[in-house]
Image (cartoon, grey):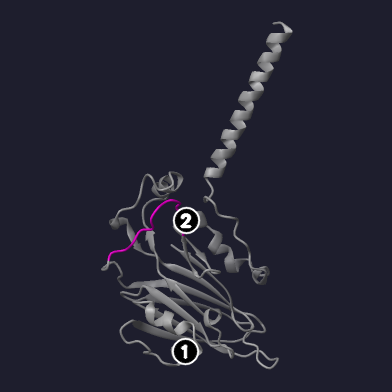
């Protein structure tokens, strides 16, 4: 084989090798959630990795990702309309809400001293009564003190006393027709959305992992779920109470 042929063969081999590496790289990228940065870890939780480890486990399989900055869900399958549950698809689900509350040592700080506070968890069939009260002081106080502030939408109210530096693990049944969860923390200084969160309960896909990944990797063009495979999600909630506001809320919808 002459030098020219050898040079051409070497160049051709290099081109094919470069193409192969490019294909492998793109294939690897396609296995990651599209367009999502790596989840940031709250520095306040660095000393307790178990507090958030469960939220990262199998996170790529979830249809939903909670954005606490915008206080709403993001549907993780790109270019696809999020599924909706039927009106009658909201039955009682025992133990469907797991809530872990972590309070900072200086939580609910007032006049230089930390204090206990009440965290109220409200299950609702409609979000409007919560929304209209959340953004004003009188409305927040009403939701913290009046159990039936809206008799048509409020299904249950549960109060929990949280001490500074403490941790509580709670398991709640999701009541029939419960579509929203409201959380209000009774700080000395109530401040709208910094003292409250509204969580819509999203639908989840009960099909096998393989079918869900087919839908994800095809960007929603194949394998969309039908109504029979959808149900209301079971929630794992991690609530972090800070000095004068809710520092963070993390949720997994399974």
Q: CA distance from mark 2 to mark 1?
A: 34 Å
How packed mark 2 is, by other alpha carbons closer than 10 Å (few <14, some 14-19, many 20 or more), is many
Q: Residue at the location (62% across, 87% down)?
A: 108
For the image, the number of numbered tags is 2
For residue 23, above or below residue 219: above
Q: Position of residue 254 (x, y in %)?
A: 43, 62
- In the rendered image, which residue does mark 2 sit on? 76
| Residue at the extreme left of the image, as rendered | 88
Identify the element where label 1 is drawn.
helix
Name the chief secondary structure element in magenta.
Answer: loop
| Left or right, residue 14 beside residue 205 | right
- In the rendered image, which residue does mark 1 sit on? 144
Q: Which residues are magenta?
A: 75-86
| Residue 182 placement: quadrant | bottom left
Identify the element where label 2 is drawn.
loop
Query: Magenta includes 171?
Result: no
């Amino acid at each position: 084989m002459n030098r020219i042929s050898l040079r051409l063969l070497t160049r051709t081999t290099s081109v094919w090798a470069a193409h192969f590496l490019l294909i492998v790289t793109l294939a690897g990228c396609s296995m990651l959630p599209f367009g999502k940065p790596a989840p940031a870890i709250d520095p306040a939780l660095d000393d307790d990795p178990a507090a958030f480890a469960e939220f990262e486990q199998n996170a790529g399989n979830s249809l939903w990702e909670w954005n606490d900055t915008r206080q709403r869900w993001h549907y993780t399958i790109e270019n696809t309309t999020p599924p909706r549950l039927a009106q009658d698809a909201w039955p009682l689900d025992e133990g469907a809400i797991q809530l872990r509350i972590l309070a900072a040592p200086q939580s609910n700080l007032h006049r230089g001293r930390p204090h206990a506070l009440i965290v109220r968890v409200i299950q609702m069939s409609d979000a409007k009564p919560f929304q209209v009260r959340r953004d004003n002081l009188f409305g927040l106080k009403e939701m913290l003190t009046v159990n039936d502030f809206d008799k048509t939408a409020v299904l249950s109210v549960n109060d929990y006393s949280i001490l500074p530096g403490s941790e509580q693990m709670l398991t709640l049944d999701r009541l029939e027709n419960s579509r929203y969860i409201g959380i209000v923390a009774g700080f000395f200084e109530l401040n709208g959305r910094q003292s409250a969160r509204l969580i819509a309960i999203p639908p989840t896909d009960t099909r096998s992992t393989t079918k869900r990944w087919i839908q994800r990797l095809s960007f929603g063009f194949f394998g969309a779920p039908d109504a029979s495979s959808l149900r209301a999600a079971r929630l794992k909630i991690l609530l972090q109470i800070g000095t004068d506001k809710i520092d963070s809320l993390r949720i997994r919808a399974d």
